[in-house]
Amino acid sequence: MLRRLTADVLAIRDRELQGAGGGSMALAPLRIVRLNEEFFMKARIIVTLKSGVLDPQGKAIEGALTGLGFAGAHNVRQGKIIEMKVDETDETAARAKVEDMCKKLLANPVMENYSIELTA
Amino acid sequence: MKTSVIVFPASNCDRDAAVALEQATGKAPDMIWHGDADLPATDLIVLPGGFSYGDYLRSGAMAAHSPIMRAVIEKAKAGTPVIGICNGFQILTEAGLLPGALMRNAGLDFVCRTVTLTVENNQSMFSSVFEKGQAVNFPVAHHDGNFFADSETLDRLESESRVVFRYVDNPNGSARDIAGIINDSGNVLGLMPHPERVISPLLGGVDGAAFFRGLVEAVG
C-alpha cells in the first residue's frame, strides 16, 4: 500500500516538475516522498574496461600479488562500482534512468562497459 | 582578435594560456568561468590544462558537462577554433568534440618532462607555421595521456590527416604515438603537450610561441 502511494506521489511530482517552471506546489510532494525513501530502488553500477583495452593498474596489481606470493592470479582488471538510491519504485523506470546516467556520464563507451544491478 | 580561456575548478594552466595568448595577440583573453552559460564574442577558445574536478570519475568527465560547455560545443560546431591542452584535450574527448579517450599512462607514472613531437600535418590552422615533419619541443605533465581509440577510428584519423602531432619517443603508451588530433572540420585541436609553457627562452623554449603566433596568423 505504501509502495503504491510512493509511486503515485512520484508520478504527481514528475507531472508538476514538467509543468510550467515547477512552482511552489512542486515542493510539497517532494517532502512526502522523502518519508517513503525505503521503497526506492538501490542501484549498483559496475564499470569495467572493455576487453582488449590495456589496464596498467590491473597489471600493476597482478605484479604486486605475484610479489606477495599469490601464484596463479591472472588477467587482473580494475574497475569501479558506483552505488546510489534512485527515487523510483518501479524497476523498469529505475533501470531506464540509470542506463541514461551511464550513457551520459558514469561510463565512457569508448573504453568502458557497464552493468546495472537493481534491488528494492 | 578576441580570445577566451575557460576556467574550470582546478584548472592550473589557465594563466599560462592567457599569457601565451596575450603575447600572440597583443590583447588579454577573456577568462570565462565554467559555471557561466554564455561566451562573449570570441575568435578562439582555449580549454586549459589542469585537474578539473580533481579528475574524479574520469579526467575531464565532469568538466565536459559544465554549463559553459554547451556554448563551447555550439561555437565549435559553428567553426570557431578551439584548442584543448592536456586536461582540455580530455574534456574535448569527454564532450564528444574529438574521438577517442585519454587513459591512465601505460607505465602508470605521472610523466613530467619536455618531449619532442613531429609535426605530421602542417595544413591545419594549428600547425601551418611549422614544416611538415619538423620536430618541436613541448613539455608534457600528465597522468592520463594515453590516447586510446578503436583501430577503425585510428585508421580514419590517419587517413584523414587528423593526427597533427606525434611523439618521437612515446611517453605514455598512446596508440600510434598520437600526441594531438583535430576534428573532422579541422577547427578543434586536442593535444596533451603544453605549447603555452614554452613561449620564451626564459621558460626553456620558444616552440610554443611559434605555435600561438602561427595560429593567430591563420585565424586572422
Image (cartoon, coloured by chain):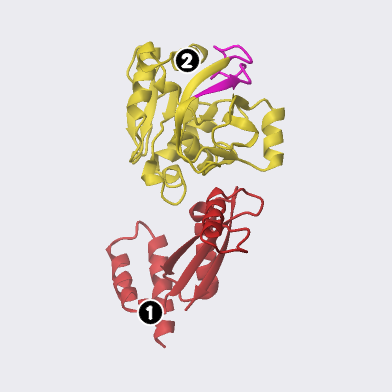
Chain colours: A red, B yellow
Q: Main secondary structure of the magenta part?
A: loop
Question: Residue B216: x percent and y percent?
Answer: 46, 14
Q: Residue visible at 51% across and 44% down?
A: B104
**Circle 2 residue:** B207
Q: Residue visible at 61% across and 28% down?
A: B185
On screen, residue B215 versus residue A20, left or right, reads right
- What secondary structure is found at the residue carrying circle 2? helix
Asked whether residue B219 is drawn in magenta, I would say no
Question: Residue B38: x percent and y percent?
Answer: 37, 35
**Circle 1 residue:** A38
Asked whether residue B127 is drawn in magenta, I would say yes
Q: Residue visible at 63% across and 16% down?
A: B133
- Contact (Cβ within 8 Å) of mark 1 with mark 2: no
Foreground pick, A115 / B79: A115
Q: Quick one: label 2, few (<14), some, or many (20+) residues within 10 Å?
A: many
Tell me the amino acid under the disc marked 2.
Answer: Asp
- What secondary structure is found at the residue carrying circle 1? helix
Tell me the amino acid under the disc marked 1.
Answer: Glu
Q: Quick one: label 1, few (<14), some, or many (20+) residues within 10 Å?
A: some
On screen, residue B202 versus residue B90, left or right, reads left
Foreground pick, A70 / B215: A70
Question: Residue B13: x percent and y percent?
Answer: 36, 30
Tell me the CA gap for discs 1 and 2: 60 Å
On screen, residue B108 versus residue B157, left or right, reads left
